[in-house]
Image: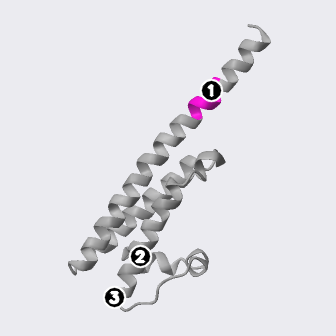
Amino acid sequence: MTELHIDVAAVAGRLEGLNKAREAGLAACRQVIRNSSSAIRAVHLGQPDVVAARTADAAAALETAREALAPYPAIYHAGFLHDAAKEYVEARATAALVADEPVVTSQAQSSSTACSSRWTGR
C-alpha cells in the first residue's frame, strides 16, 4: 500500500466512526425527546410513577447520546444533543413545579446523587 492509500484508509475509518456516532447519538436524542414528552404528558395526567419512569429513561438515553458523541466535538455541539437536553430539563422542571418541589439546578444535580433518586424514585 502506498502512503496515500494509508492516509485515505485512515480518513475513511474516521468518517465511518463519526457516522456511527452521529447515528447512535441521533437515535438516543430521539429517545430523550420522546420520553421527556411522555413524562410531561404523565405530569398532566397525574401519573407520578410514569413521570419517574420516563424521566429515568430520558436521563439514560441522554447519557448514551453524550457518550456516543463525546469523541466527536463537531457533532456533539451540532445542536441536536442540546435540543434533547433542553427537552429533558423541561420535563424535570415541569414535574417539579407541578409537584410543588424545588427545581434542581445543574450545579445541585452534578454535586448531589440525592437528586437522581428524587427524579427516578430510586
Q: Please tell me whether residue 61 is drawn above or below residue 108 in the rendered image.
A: above
Q: Residue furthest left?
A: 45
Give the residue at mark 1.
13
| Residue 98 spot, x, y in % from top left | 33, 87
Indicate left or right for 85 with 4 as reference. left
Q: How is the image coloured?
A: one colour
Q: Amino acid at mark 2?
A: Arg
Q: Secondary structure at mark 3?
A: loop
- Identify the residue at image location x=55%, y=77%: 109
Q: How many marks?
A: 3
Q: Amino acid at mark 3?
A: Ala
Could you say which is closer to the camera, residue 62 or residue 84?
Answer: 84
Could you say which is closer to the camera, residue 56 or residue 93?
Answer: 93
- Identify the residue at image location x=41%, y=90%: 101
Give the CA separation, mark 3 to mark 2: 11 Å
- Identify the residue at image location x=55%, y=81%: 105
Q: What secondary structure prevails in the magenta region? A: helix
Give the CA separation, mark 2 to mark 1: 39 Å
Q: Which mark is residue 22?
A: none
Check whether the beta carbons of the residues at disc 2 and disc 1 lie within 8 A of each other: no
Q: Which mark is residue 99?
A: 3
